[in-house]
Amino acid sequence: MNSKKKIYLTCKDYTVSNEKFELIYNSKFEMLETYPQPKLDKLASYYESSTYISHTDSKKTFIDKIYQLVKKYTLKNKLKLVNSFKSPEKKILDVGCGTGDFLFTCKNNGWSVVGVEPNINAKSLAEIKLASSNSNPIFSKLEELEDIKLDVITLWHVLEHVPNLEKYISHLKSLLKPNGILVVAVPNFKSYDAQYYKKFWAAYDVPRHLWHFSKKSIQLLFENENMKVDQILPMKFDSFYVALLSEKYKHQKSNFLKAFWIGLLSNIKASESKEYSSLIYIIKNS
């Protein structure tokens, strides 16, 4: 993806390496790009941390416990959302399925499920949860899926991680039925909490997050594949969780009251601006 090199921020990897990365503003798509992007053979090493919670079912720390508590609530909302699409065959793919909780929830509610998860440990946990049926495969790469057409594809905080972004979006489209629906949830760098925390904003999460989206960038990227953003929904819990991590990055200690206030303030401001900390995009194939 081409962009004129204009540095927006310099951020640090607080999870694994402590390396610094630049965020480059891409004016064509109104988005940010992490620079330099790790080479493919090194990218996996930036996920090798016991604190990377989406690859574990950890409940060790207070933040872990909050994450797991909120996850139970959001799983119900995610299921309600995909059920609202009235898909005829109820075939769903969850890309970046992590430890398989969403797939497990869908399966128990009548969906035929498929998952993609590149992390070996997370994939193993997901396979255990879905072990009661051999008809629910979990693949390591999206490219391994062949001869399949799906009603719904979900990417819950995944698109920001994928190299070769435009090629990946094209592949997603090829897996959807003509009237299929893509659900994409990503952080929003135009939210109040992003503006407040700046280089400490936890949702930049460099270099695991290669791309940082605005509403306009999502619209433009999918328009290139003749796909239309039909609806945008907020993820209101994300501002609180991201603020908790951001406070820790900024001050080297947790400040729950401050994080709660910034998370709340972000949602209050977003009730007018619609720039929530994270957004869910309902995208229709055409």
Image: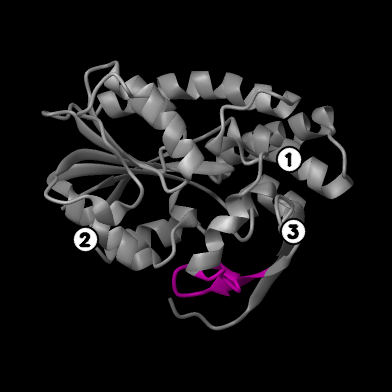
Q: Which of marks 2 and 3 is nearer the N terminus?
A: 3
Q: Mark 2 points at which residue?
A: 226
Question: Is residue 38 visible from the viewing direction of this image?
Answer: yes
Q: Is mark 2 on a helix, strand or loop?
A: loop
What amino acid is found at the position of numbered circle 3 in the picture? Lys
What amino acid is found at the position of numbered circle 1 in the picture? Leu
Q: Give residue 202's position: percent from left, percent from top.
A: 68, 48
Q: What residue range appears in magenta?
A: 22-39
Q: Which of marks 2 and 1 is nearer the N terminus?
A: 2
Q: Viewed as shown, does residue 219 lie left or right of 243?
A: left
Q: Is mark 1 on a helix, strand or loop?
A: helix
Nearest the viewer among 229 and 179 is 179
Q: Residue at x 88, y 45 (%)?
A: 251
* Residue occupying the far bottom of the picture: 4
Q: Is mark 3 on a helix, strand or loop?
A: helix
Q: Viewed as shown, does residue 91 lie left or right of 182?
A: left
Residue 245: assigned label: 1
- Whether 257 is drawn above or below 34: the answer is above
Q: Do the residues labelled 2 and 3 touch (CB within 8 Å)?
A: no
- Whether 201 is drawn above or below 231: the answer is below
Nearest the viewer among 90 and 145 is 145
- Whether 39 is drawn above or below 210: the answer is below
What amino acid is found at the position of numbered circle 2 in the picture? Asn
Residue 199: assigned label: 3
**Label 2 to label 3: alpha-carbon separation:** 34 Å
Q: Give residue 258's position: percent from left, percent from top.
A: 82, 33
Nearest the viewer among 49 and 105 is 49
